[in-house]
Image (cartoon, helix red, strand yellow):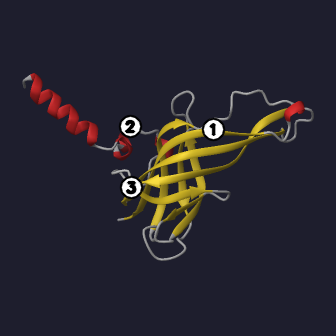
Amino acid sequence: MNARQLICLAGLLATVPAALAQTSLPDSIKVPDGHKVALETTGVGEITYECRDKANAAGQTEWFFVGPKAVLNDRSGKQVGTYFGPPATWQAKDGSKVTGTQLAVAPSSPGNLPYQLVKANPAEGKGAMSGVSYIQRVALKGGVAPSAECTTANKGKQEVVKYQADYIFWAAS
């Protein structure tokens, strides 16, 4: 294979979504056999955190996850839906939407949210979210709690952090 063929091959491989490579993901967030990809999106948005008292730890504070707000784009960059919460809700432009229950998380790379696997509740409305059974969060960039100090002096302060993640929606095959 010459250099030009290698470059072409590398370009082709780069277009294969990493999210579909289940083998490269931690076992805890792999979708069970018998499911196929129904929709692939990239969520681009922000997560709000608030400095609050730590649960069951008098006098200690921590950044608490308040909720996400993101646009869901398809692979061409066209908006196909939104993601917001609480509760975590993925809504397609056609009005159909799903919420779900987190089944597992696994560390991704430092400074990024963890991988996540969600079991979807039955969809509300007919459309793109109909039949979705699992949602995977992969290909993460940012979104972790702020590095700013959270102390009793700034309790109640909110910080917004930017993030990006691929949300892969799966349905039974």
User: Where is 48 relative to 62, above or below?
Assistant: below
Residue 149, by quadrant, is top right
**Foreground disc of the pair 2, 3:** 3
- Outermost residue toward the bottom in this view: 126
Q: Dot 2 lies on which element? A: helix
Q: Residue at x 38, y 37 (%)?
A: 24
Judging depth in this view, the residue of 76 and 23 nearest the camera is: 76
In the picture of the structure, the residue carrying the numbered disc 2 is: 24
Q: Residue at x 46, y 43 (%)?
A: 138
How far apart in space, not on screen, are marks 3 and 1 (Cα)?
23 Å
- Outermost residue toward the front in this view: 78
Residue 151: where, in percent of width, then height? 85, 30
Q: Residue at x 79, y 35 (%)?
A: 62
Q: Residue at x 87, y 40 (%)?
A: 56
The kind of residue tagged 1 is Val
Residue 121: where, in percent of width, then height? 56, 66
Judging depth in this view, the residue of 22 and 59 nearest the camera is: 59
Residue 11: where, in percent of width, then height? 21, 35
Mark 3 / mark 1, whichever is N-terminal: 3
Mark 3 burial class by Cα count in 10 Å: few <14, some 14-19, many 20+: few
In the picture of the structure, the residue carrying the numbered disc 3 is: 78
How far apart in space, not on screen, are marks 2 and 3 (Cα)?
27 Å
In the picture of the structure, the residue carrying the numbered disc 1 is: 161
The kind of residue tagged 2 is Ser
Residue 53: where, in percent of width, then height? 86, 39
Residue 51, by quadrant, is top right
